[in-house]
Amino acid sequence: MDDAVESIEESEQLVTKLDKEILDWNALKKLKKRDTELEEVQQIVSDLVEDLSQELHNTEIELEKNREKQEENGDEEMVDEKGNKVDI
């Protein structure tokens, strides 16, 4: 009888231990998945920042060209190809 009780207690201890390990494993798996997803988001954000920086650079170049044109033309009104007034 003592052997049976001892076996039952041992089995219960193993079940408890395995339950903890399974929970820890699932938590670890979820954390790894989250980390992977965060790395992907970080890469997307980095790409977006790079694109926006390039767009800002291009816009600054165009702005400078427009300022130079405006200075060259002085008080003359700027017009497009169709003769419509253009405000720079």
Image: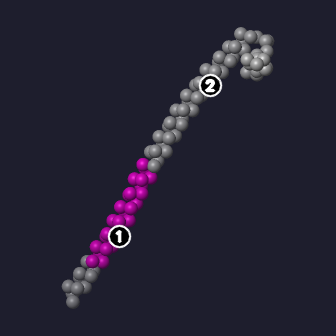
Vertical side of 2 occupied by 42: above or below: above
Q: Is residue 88 magenta?
A: no
Vertical side of 15 occupied by 59: above or below: above
In magenta, the rendered stretch is 11-36
The residue that appears at 74% across and 11% down in the rendered structure is 73
> Is 66 left or right of 76, judged from the image as shown?
left
Please report whichever mark, 2 or 1, sits nearer to the chain's N-terminal start: 1
Q: Quadrant of the C terminus?
A: top right
Secondary structure at numbered mark 1: helix
> Is 54 left or right of 69, judged from the image as shown?
left
Which disc, if any, is residue 19? 1
- Residue under label 2: 59
Vertical side of 38 occupied by 4: above or below: below
The residue that appears at 46% across and 45% down in the rendered structure is 40
Viewer-nearest of discs 2 and 1: 2
Q: Position of residue 53 (x, y in %)?
A: 56, 30
The amino acid type of the residue labelled 2 equals: Thr
Farthest bottom residue in view: 1
The residue that appears at 33% across and 65% down in the rendered structure is 21
